[in-house]
Image (spheres, rainbow, N blue to C red):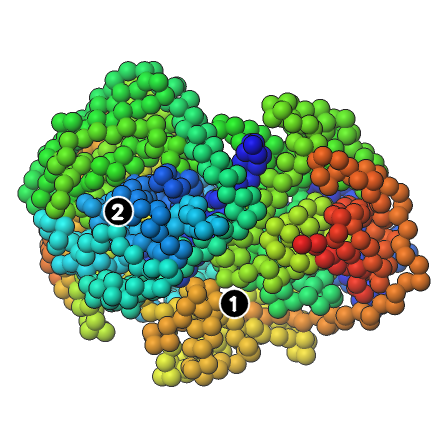
Amino acid sequence: MSWFIGVDVGGTFTDFHCLNEATGEAFVHKAPSTPDNPARAIVEGVRAVASRLGVDFQAVRRLAHGTTVATNALIQRKGGKVALVTTKGFRDLLEIGRQVRPHMYALQEDHPEPLVPRHWRFEVDERMTADGTAERALDEPGLALIAKEIEAAKVDAVAIGFLFAFISPEHERKAAEILSAKLDGVYVSRSSEVQPEFREYERLSTTVLNAYLQPVLARYLADLGDQVGKLSEKIQIGINQSSGGLMSISRAHRFPVRTALSGPAAGAVGAIHVARLSQRPDVVTLDMGGTSADVALIRGYATDTAHDRQVGGFPVRLPMIDINTIGAGGGSIAWFAPDGLLKVGPNSAGAVPGPACYGLGGTQATVTDANLVLGRLSPKGLLDGKVALDAAASRRAIEPIAQRLGFSVERTAHGMLAIVVANMVRAIRTVSVERGHDPRGYALMPFGGAGPLHAVDVARALGMREILVPPAPGILCAQGLVVSDLKEDFVRTRRTRLAAAELPAMKSVIAGLAAEAGRWLDSEGVASSEREALLTLDMRYVGQNFELPVRLPSAALPDIEALARLFAAAHEQSYGYANLEAPIEVINFRLTGRAKRAETKSPAAAKTPSSPPAPAGRRPVHFRWEAADNTPIYRRDALKPGHTLSGPAVVEQLDATTLLYPGDTLTVDAAGSLLIEAAS
Amino acid sequence: MTADPITLEIIHNGLRSITDESFIALMKSAYSTNIKERRDHSCAVIDLSGRLIAQAENSLPIHLASMWGLMTAVLAKVKIEDMAAGDIFVANDPHVAGGTHLPDLNMAMPVFVDGKVMAFVCNIAHHADMGGMAPGSMAGGMREIYQEGLRIPVVRLFRKGELVADIFDLLLLNVRVPDERKGDYFAQVAACRLGERRLKEMAQRYGTPVLLEAFDEIVTRTRQRMERAIGTIPPGTYRFADRMDDDGLGMVDIPIVLELTVGNGRIRADFNGSAPEVDGNINLKLNGSGATVAYAIKALLDPDVPNNQGVLDVIDVAAPEGTVVNCAPPAATAARAHVCQRIVDCVIGALAPAIPDRAVAAANGANTTAVLSGIDPTTKQRYVYLETLGGGFGGRATKDGKDGVQVHITNTSNLPVEAIEMEYPLRVESYGLIEDSGGAGKYRGGLGLRRVVRPVGHEAVFSGTGERFRFAPWGLFGGKDGVPGRFQRREPDGSMTALDNKPAEVTLTPNQAVVMETPGAGGYGDPAERAPDLLKRDAESGKFSPAYLSRAYPKGKP
């Protein structure tokens, strides 16, 4: 018997999702986080889980971990001291970036200062060119002198980024060798290894971030590895990447920047898993927590991959699940803009002091306070009453706003929720148009603590008919970790015209990537039967400046006509047109190596339970501001597959509350998810 | 009455959602690089009296002028009762149709609800070519708008939903690569129709009367917000004068003179005394001058205020016709952005004594443009590489100016070195900050940028547009001026040849290189007050040489 455990470390709670690999048995656990050393909560949690299950630690086979250590280090600027070595003539590139301001109209706002101060940015004489040849050889004696200066600077890490190193990494490789030999105990990251992809500033920025995070992540991972190792040496630790797959501790150690957005990625993987179990291939996810909401589009059980994101104000060029974040959460604060309009968010009361009703000193009216005064959240509070909520405090917080508006507290609270819903609707619309999709063809999957409370409102505004609430919406990220694959992305930039004559060259690039993936799978001990490769080509029309990723149906390269057709279809989808005559070129070749897990089995259709679900109680809930309906409250665990309900109703569970308006209908499907049909 | 602050916020949110969605739809389906990559386009909702109600978040400040101008021209020409559902108007001409330069193609569509026009959806997109003497319709050297491209007055491109093919044939015959331009036109049409559909959905939900009332209320509240912001400036008259280097056709020292009168929540901008319009293509129409003043006021006072008519309503603009800030036909206008930059400096310069905490010293004040072209020796194809370069941003009341960045009315990104060299037979030898180029001050000005480029294996031709290459970006309150920009050619022996500020067709052989240097910005405050830790950083970073530091800060000890 062996268990997989997914651990998602959040700001307030550390969530555990445990899965018995053989029986499919699963359960969840929640413990307070230990921000000073997140590993402590993890290890204590694993102990608690094991004792609750009555199993030996030896039975735990894999611990999949989503970490925010990198993200927090970046936000708080607590990474290491970094030096940069770059091509002569370009030391300022890291600082200039794309020469733009963050905001058109703000005279006082700048992009953040680079993570490497100018006097630690060193230029070495060398130059590669676009055709892969060296115009100037690497000046090794010069580099030796630079090594001395770096040594004197006493930095923790060095980033190396040369022009065109994504085509010819020889100079970077040699420089890394020399610097590693001369600088004892200093981490070395080079751009041709971190992300060998075209566009020097983004590659450089990603490499510098990697170097910056390395000292912090290395300490943390070493500690985690030690402590988990003490429980059992058999536990394999997988660290979640922003692209939604797991990597080993040793890879995470080399490429910490890949964990920079790992939390939300796990949620999307969990959402795909739930969508599969409920057989809903096209889903818009809405992960609404305390401070923000993450939105992702799932099409055919797959998310899109984005490559350009900002983390802590810096661009990161790495494959990441395409997720959009909006400043709308349970803690979002209501305030008046200078023109007198009421706004909600993006500022949040966070976990501390939190909404006024937490009684931790918060006095500003938040979304959670509005839900509480409208009866939508239970006054008994969250986590089955372990965190009591003070409705009187919520009322006091909302009153000043109500007075200024001349409205009742209920009408004000109702308005606050309408505004936060409008913000989410706007974001989902924008994301959908941007990706070329119409949300009306999708189901909405709300999760996170606050998602299911607002899902029906959001779906209705977008014309979406169906809402799918997962069995454990508050813990979907941890569940996603359990079902994540071991995965690694490899990339080569080779600008190649899409023409029959280029096929051999293209095949050889792919063969090189496949060999690299093979070496990685070997090192991770993945059996050949479990191996899987996905091939994606980034293509564009000749003359365009940006590429479209085109996922190929198999890891074998089809003929040129088929590639052109695939590109045309992707272009049509994204841009609304395709030009069948224009020449096409490939810029990047991407190969994802994956260790497949067993297929997710859809549960058998459920028999209708013999008796309808019984409400656990009733309370007045304001669906309209004018009046409250006496509404039945159901416990989620009383709802069994096959049960149906009609709104008005509230469904409560450990860490999430689902709201049904009058006229909405709910069915519990075979997988235990709630399928809600929104009344039109 | 339903337009309470909550309903208003939700309707306002919905309107911005419409403009943002249209903005993205246009960007995704257009062909022109300017639209796809540099987002040189805008989308808006406009009411029946031509007031701007909502504009997409990422819209460019100068497009505020064209939206406003276009609707004024449409309403002057066509009575609302003569419009039909499915009509779409197009125009681009600065002199008769409210545009600011010809490549910006403006489109407007009436939105019918219950048989009546409820509002207009509009958009603007910068097409890669609008005909005329030179590809791109942006080149200098022309004296009349007739040479710059096709002039389009307000005409219907669609009548009752049907394409007016005769007009479209005429438009497309006059541009280079008509197939691509057709794609741009249709991208704009698609954006109009998406906006129309969404606005109708909103009207269904709220009813026309509620929406119209909300339009009023949104504009009024924004206007009041601006009035309060203007109320923070001591009432009075403020003056400032500055100069453009030249117009590229031999006219030098072109004065821009501004008198701002502030009081009762309004600002009057009077450009009397500014230069007569010039032969070169830097002339601006009055609506462009107004939009630029609005940009500067908004940026100084309240950067987050929504972009709508309320911002424009508090500003009155006056300038004699036939001046460089209110040009008359047939003045050339393609490069009007340069005058915009100088107007921004004038507004800030005038108000600086009144609001010293919010003012900034002069930024690089240019839209430095470089174009290299030639025949690629490998492909034998003609190539044209165009880039606009940032420079220093001015010193501020609490911090230094940013180094190497686009300023004020422009915010377009650079092209990566690796993209340039993969695409064109060019070598970028270096790209960096110009040491010692930021004006000294308590808070120093930002540094300019230097880029050195040479052709590989062929002869190339360089043309450029520089501003603030003669008249340095000024410092404020004792801060020193930034260093002006310049174009030079590096000769085979390493010596430098000075080039014009707006050089045309300079030949470069493979053993020559063009050295482009953009202006550094002015400093803020007395250099003697510069804090020791900042001086230490200036020295340590190497952004300033020891010689410069001891000269500019004789008393300072890092």
Q: Measuring 23% from the left and 74% from the top, which residue is drawn there?
A: B379
- What is the quadrant of the C terminus of chain A in the image? bottom right
Q: Which residue is mark 1?
A: A490
- Characterize the local packing of mark 2: few (<14), some (14-19) or many (20 or more) Cα atoms within 10 angstroms: few
Q: Please name which of the two marks, 1 or 2, marks the residue nearer to the observer.
A: 2
Tag 2 secondary structure? helix
- What is the quadrant of the N terminus of chain A in the image? bottom right
Residue A201 placement (x, y as % from top left): 39, 53
Tag 1 secondary structure? strand
CB contact under 8 Å: marks 1 and 2: no
Q: Is residue B303 visible?
A: yes
Q: Which residue is mark 2?
A: B77
Three-letter code, disc 1: Phe
Chain letter belonging to callout 2: B
Residue B511 vs A633, above or below: the answer is: below
Chain letter belonging to callout 1: A
